[in-house]
Image (tube, helix red, strand yellow):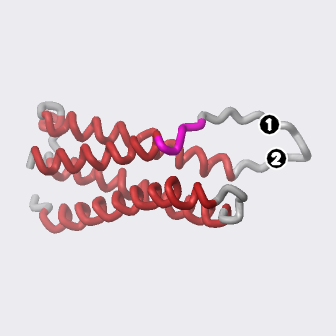
C-alpha cells in the first residue's frame, strides 16, 4: 500500500508538534519561570499546561505512527536496525518529560472531601533536566533522519 501522502501529513504533524513542544518548554523554563517569582503570571502556566498536554501527545503519537509507516508495519524490520535503536533511545529521552506533564495534569484534578488530609508523593524533576532530556530527544531524532535516511 502506498503511504506517501499519509506519511507526508504525519511527518509535518510530528515535526510541528515537536517543535512546538520544545519551544513551549523553552519559554516556560527560561523566560516565564524566572519572571514569575512573585506568582503574578501563574495563570499563564495553567493555560500553557492545557496546551502542552495535547501537543506532546500528538508529537509522541505521530512519531510512533511515522515509525510504523517507515517500516511498512513489519516489526521484524524494526528490531533489526541501528535506526530503530536510535529512535527508541530518542523516545526514551522524552518519556520522563511527557510523564511529568501527564502527572501534573492529574494532580490538578484532585478534589478533597470535607477537609480530609491526603498525602500525595510527588517526584520533582529539575526543569533544566527535563529541558535537557527533551533537547536530547530532538537532537537524536534529527541525527536519525540525517544519518539513516
**Quadrant of the rendering where the N terminus is positioned:** bottom left
Look at mark 1 in the image and give the residue it sits on. Answer: 118
Q: Residue at x 39, y 56 (%)?
A: 22
For numbered disc 1, what is the local secondary structure?
loop
Q: Residue at x 25, y 65 (%)?
A: 12
Look at mark 2 in the image and give the residue it sits on. Answer: 112
Question: In the image shown, does 98 or 9 lie closer to the viewer?
Answer: 98
Q: Main secondary structure of the magenta part?
A: loop
| Relative to 97, residue 51 above or below | below
* Residue 135 within the segment the image draws in magenta: no
| Pointer 1 local density, CA inside 10 Å: few below 14, some 14–19, many at least 20 | few
Spot occupied by residue 2 in the image (x, y as percentages of width and height): 10, 61
Question: In the image shown, does 117 or 45 lie closer to the viewer?
Answer: 45
Question: In the image shown, does 5 or 136 lie closer to the viewer?
Answer: 136
The earlier-in-sequence mark between 2 and 1 is: 2
Q: Residue at x 77, y 50 (%)?
A: 111
Residue segment shown in magenta: 124-128
Residue sticking out furthest to the right: 114
Left or right relative to 82: residue 37 = right
Spot occupied by residue 53 in the image (x, y as percentages of width and height): 50, 56
Spot occupied by residue 82 in the image (x, y as percentages of width and height): 14, 34
Q: Are marks 2 and 1 in contact (CB under 8 Å)?
A: yes
Spot occupied by residue 63 in the image (x, y as percentages of width and height): 29, 52
Amino acid at each position: 500500500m502506498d503511504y506517501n501522502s499519509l506519511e507526508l501529513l504525519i511527518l509535518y504533524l510530528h515535526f510541528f508538534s515537536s517543535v512546538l513542544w520544545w519551544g513551549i518548554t523553552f519559554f516556560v523554563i527560561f523566560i516565564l519561570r524566572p519572571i514569575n517569582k512573585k506568582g503574578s503570571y501563574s495563570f499563564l502556566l495553567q493555560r500553557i499546561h492545557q496546551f502542552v498536554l495535547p501537543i506532546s501527545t500528538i508529537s509522541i503519537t505521530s512519531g510512533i505512527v511515522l515509525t510504523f509507516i517507515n517500516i511498512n508495519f513489519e516489526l521484524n524490520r524494526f528490531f533489526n536496525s541501528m535506526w530503530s535503536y536510535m529512535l527508541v533511545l530518542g523516545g526514551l529521552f522524552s518519556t520522563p518529560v511527557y510523564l511529568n506533564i501527564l502527572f501534573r495534569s492529574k494532580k490538578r484534578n484532585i478534589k478533597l472531601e470535607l477537609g480530609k488530609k491526603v498525602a500525595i508523593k510527588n517526584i520533582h524533576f529539575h526543569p533544566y533536566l527535563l529541558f535537557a532530556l527533551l533537547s536530547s530527544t530532538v537532537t537524536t531524532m534529527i541525527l536519525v533522519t540525517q544519518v539513516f535516511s
